[in-house]
Image (tube, rainbow, N blue to C red):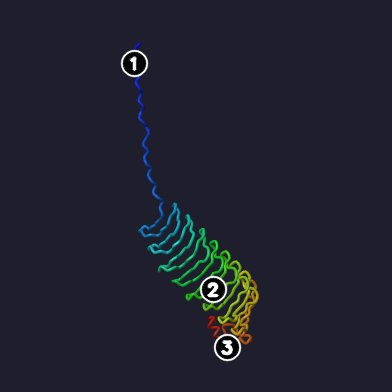
Amino acid sequence: MAQVPDNKTEETAAPSAEKTAKPEKEKPPPPTEKKVESKEGTLRKHFALKDGKKNGEARIYDKEGVLIRKEWYRNGVLEGPVTHYDAGGGISKQSTVIRGKLEGEMLRFNKGVLVSKTQYQGGKRHGEQLVFNEQEKIVSKKNYARDKLNGEVIGYDGQDNVIIKTTYTNDLRHGPTTGYYPGGGLREKGQYQNDRLEGEFLRYHVNGKVRERQSFKEGKPLGPPQYFKDNGEPDAPPGTPPEQKGWLEKILDFIFGK
């Protein structure tokens, strides 16, 4: 028996419709710095970056493009040394910031001369502060606790001689206050309570004799002051013609501007 030819034509497989994948564009690396310029094109800020955050040294410039500050960042937070500069390029202030707050010693300068040293903790003055004159001689010593004066404040004459000591509590004079002549002799003494004079306030001649005496209650005088000569005898109040005063009184009047 003859075979009947198969009339079905073989179906050929359709070509693959898969699209040829295009290679992805490589992303540009994140910037490692950022510059901020004024409208005139003057550089005002320059930051180092890491992963889009400030990280490393930052420089700040004035409107003329002069460097006025260097500071350091870590993961976008101010942390590390901070240095300020004056118009001449000299250092005007140095400090350290930890987690965005002042920590440790801050130094201030005026044209290269040390002006002050101040201790900080958690962004507040905490500890000793020293202030100096143009010859870098100490003129005051203070102590702070959480940004308020606490303890003894000492004033100097610029020649290492103590001229006054006053006790503070929470920014208020509270306790004894004592003044001295440059030679070390007692000049005055009194007592404060809540920033007001309380009790007897005394001033002295350079020979140690009482010069003036007055009593206070809550900062108000209880009567007029009494005055004494350097030999202990009663004296006339200020305003008496100088020729009627002794030589020591004349010198003291000149020193204290009376």
Which residue, given by chain and number where applicable, does mark 2 sit on? 140
Alpha carbon distance from label 1 to label 3:
153 Å
Question: Which of label 1 and label 3 is nearer to you?
Answer: 1
Nearest the viewer among 227 and 40 is 40
Q: Residue furthest top?
A: 1
| Residue in the picture at 41% in, 58% down | 46
Label 1 amino acid?
A: Pro
Question: Which of label 3 and label 2 is nearer to you?
Answer: 2
Which residue, given by chain and number where applicable, does mark 3 sit on? 246
Q: Is residue 142 left or right of residue 20?
A: right
Q: Residue furthest front?
A: 1
Label 2 amino acid?
A: Ser
Quick one: label 2 or label 1, which is nearer the N terminus?
A: 1
Q: Where does the N terminus fall, quadrant-wise?
A: top left
Question: Which of label 2 and label 1 is nearer to you?
Answer: 1
Position of residue 130 measured from the top left corner of the image (x, y, whole percent): 53, 71
Quick one: label 1 or label 3, which is nearer the N terminus?
A: 1
- Residue 5 marker: 1
Please tell me whether residue 36 is drawn above or below residue 193 in the rendered image: above
Quick one: label 3 or label 2, which is nearer the N terminus?
A: 2
Q: Find numbered disc 1 in the image and state the secondary structure of the residue it sits on.
A: loop
Q: Find numbered disc 2 in the image and state the secondary structure of the residue it sits on.
A: strand
Q: Do the residues labelled 2 and 1 touch (CB within 8 Å)?
A: no
Q: Do the residues labelled 1 and 3 touch (CB within 8 Å)?
A: no
